[in-house]
Image (spheres, rainbow, N blue to C red):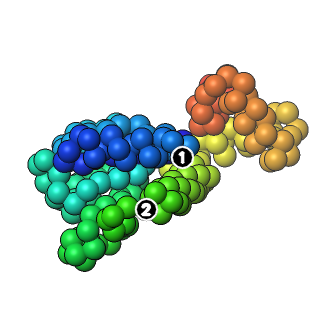
């Protein structure tokens, strides 16, 4: 699920946009009237979508965008004239008057993009420090020597015990070294 924060200067506008999204199967995490409130929610969630008007109670949308965490995308809704001024890098826009299907499809596409980016980050292999890699290699070498395992078998052994014990691979390798040395 993607965190969606709706922020407009008037609470009635924010609630109307929320209701449109919810009626079309898109859940909204928060509704607020100021950029500061939106930033507080954004800091809690780390990634998601901000659906915003141009002018908020305490700032304009470009200021809000510049202070968002990197995992957030922004959709600004305003008149065509104002959107020309608000065009910026990383800011999507929809012209008012609003067409419901445009809002729903745009938010849906943005949510897919956020989920894709999240999955890509999650699937990215973790980079180990040289010290951690050395500990794992040493534990594998010890397992290979003492238990006549191949390197793959030793690695799988460490992985399995790591998962079974709910510990990290490096911590498991350190435990193996402590017990076997």
**Nearer to the camera, 79 or 112:** 79
On-image quarter of the C terminus: top right
Q: Residue at x 85, y 33 (%)?
A: 147
From where the camera sits, is residue 43 visible? Answer: no
Q: Position of residue 79 (x, y in %)?
A: 26, 68
Q: Given this view, does label 2 or label 1 mark the residue nearer the observer? A: 2
- Between the C-alphas of marks 2 and 1, the distance is 13 Å
Badge count: 2
Identify the residue at image location x=37%, y=47%.
17
Q: Is 181 on the left-hand or right-hand side of 34?
A: right
Neighbourhood count class around disc 1 (C-alpha, 10 Å): few under 14, some 14–19, many 20 upward = few
Task: Name which residue lies at 13% across and 54% down.
Answer: 59
Mark 2 — residue?
Answer: 99
Q: x, y (%) of residue 138? A: 66, 42
Q: Secondary structure at mark 2?
A: loop
> Which residue occupies the foreground of this view, 171 or 60?
60
Callout 1: helix, strand or loop? loop
**The N terminus: image quadrant:** top right
Q: Earlier in the sequence, mark 2 or mark 1?
A: 1
Residue 82 in view (yes/no): yes
| Depth check, front residue: 82 or 175 | 82
- The residue at the far left in this view is 58
Local crowd size for mark 2, using a 10 Å CA cut-off: few (<14), some (14–19), many (≥20) = few
Q: Give percent across and percent down for residue 81.
A: 22, 75
Tag 1 residue: 24
Q: Is residue 9 left or right of residue 91?
A: left
């Amino acid at each position: 699920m993607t965190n969606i924060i709706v922020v407009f200067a008037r609470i009635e506008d924010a609630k109307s946009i929320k209701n449109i999204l919810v009626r079309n199967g898109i859940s909204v995490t928060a509704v607020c009237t100021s950029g500061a409130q939106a930033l507080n929610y954004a800091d809690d969630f780390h990634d998601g979508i901000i659906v915003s008007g141009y002018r908020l109670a305490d700032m304009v949308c470009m200021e809000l965008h510049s202070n968002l965490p990197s995992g957030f995308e922004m959709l600004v809704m305003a008149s065509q004239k104002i959107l020309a001024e608000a065009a910026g890098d990383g800011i999507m826009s929809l012209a008012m008057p609003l067409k419901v299907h445009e809002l729903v499809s745009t938010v849906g596409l943005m949510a897919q993009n956020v989920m894709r980016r999240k999955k890509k980050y999650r699937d990215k292999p973790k980079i180990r420090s040289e010290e951690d890699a050395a500990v794992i290699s040493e534990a594998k070498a010890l397992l290979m020597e003492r238990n006549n395992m191949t390197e793959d078998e030793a690695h799988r052994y460490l992985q399995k015990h790591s998962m079974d014990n709910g510990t990290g691979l490096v911590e498991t390798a350190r435990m193996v070294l402590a017990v076997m040395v």
